[in-house]
């Protein structure tokens, strides 16, 4: 984990919405591998893999179904979820932590990190310290995970719009999926998108 204070400030275009973790997103076809599990607070990016849900709530949807990539191995899916969790955690440390704690608390956070010798120990120290200062840390991370999940579906729709730009019937289906997303009908949107990409 990198020290957020040591990283250069990102260049911000005031005309574009700032979704920093979405910019770091890598699609499932990249299949990242991680050497160790992430110690950050638990997030639920993927709903249970084995039980289909009839709920339309975003939290209940399997991320792989939403993205149309449910054919990967369990190891690939787990690696992808760990990578998304890592992106969320790094984004939280870089952009959100300093808004939630004081400068003195942040300085203490840095001291506790630097006192550890391994990356895993550093991360565990950060989590333990932040859980004391931010009682709803897990809830914040869950909200960030749901936001990322929704953003990835919107990005999928935008990418498919580019792919099918000359096909009005498919664009109409994409409009339907976008409306379903806007109405929080996530399961229906995934079904619409997955049927579109199969045809």
Image (cartoon, rainbow, N blue to C red):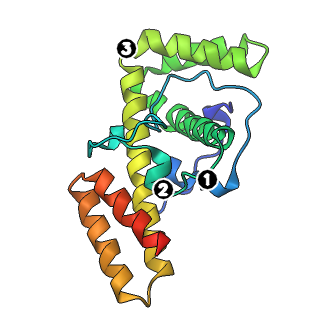
Looking at the image, which residue sits at the far bottom? 166
The answer to whether residue 17 of the structure is visible from this angle is no
Q: Position of residue 10 (x, y in %)?
A: 57, 51
Q: Is residue 75 left or right of residue 150?
A: right
Crowd around label 3: few <14 · some 14–19 · many ≥20 (10 Å): few
Depicted 54 relative to depicted 127: above or below: below
Residue in the image at 43% along x and 63% along y: 194
Mark sitting earlier along the chain (3/2): 2
Image spot of residue 127 (x, y percent): 55, 16
Front residue of this view, candidates 142 and 116: 142
Q: Which quarter of the figure has residue 79? A: top right
Q: State the image quarter where residue 193 is shown.
A: bottom left
Which mark lies nearer to you, 1 or 3? Answer: 1
Q: Are marks 1 and 3 in contact (CB under 8 Å)?
A: no
Q: Earlier in the sequence, mark 1 or mark 3?
A: 1
Q: Earlier in the sequence, mark 2 or mark 1?
A: 1
In the rendered image, which residue does mark 2 sit on? 67
Residue located beneath label 1 in the image: 28
Residue 42, numbered circle:
none
Q: Which residue is mark 3?
A: 135
Disc 2 to disc 1: CB gap under 8 Å:
yes
Could you tell me how far apart the alpha carbons at marks 2 and 1 are, in whole angstroms?
9 Å
The local secondary structure at tag 2 comes to helix
Q: Residue at x 66, y 44 (%)?
A: 73
Q: CA distance from mark 1 to mark 3?
A: 32 Å
Give the position of the N terminus as an image quadrant: top right
């Amino acid at each position: 984990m990198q020290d957020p204070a040591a990283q250069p400030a990102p260049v911000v275009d005031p005309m574009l919405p700032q979704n920093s973790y979405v910019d770091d997103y890598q699609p499932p076809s990249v299949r990242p591998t991680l050497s160790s599990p992430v110690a950050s607070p638990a997030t639920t990016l993927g709903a249970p893999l084995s039980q289909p849900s009839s709920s339309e709530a975003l939290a209940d949807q399997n991320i792989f179904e939403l993205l149309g990539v449910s054919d990967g191995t369990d190891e690939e899916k787990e690696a992808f979820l760990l990578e998304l969790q890592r992106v969320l955690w790094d984004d939280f440390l870089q952009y959100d932590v300093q808004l939630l704690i004081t400068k003195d608390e942040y300085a203490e956070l840095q001291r506790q990190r630097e006192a550890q010798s391994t990356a895993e120990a550093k991360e565990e120290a950060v989590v333990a310290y932040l859980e004391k200062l931010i009682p709803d840390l897990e809830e914040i991370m869950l909200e960030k995970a749901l936001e990322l999940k929704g953003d990835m579906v919107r990005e999928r729709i935008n990418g498919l719009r580019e792919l099918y730009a000359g096909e009005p019937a498919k664009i109409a289906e994409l409009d339907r999926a976008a409306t379903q997303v806007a109405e929080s009908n996530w399961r229906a949107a995934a079904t619409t998108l997955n049927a579109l990409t199969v045809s």
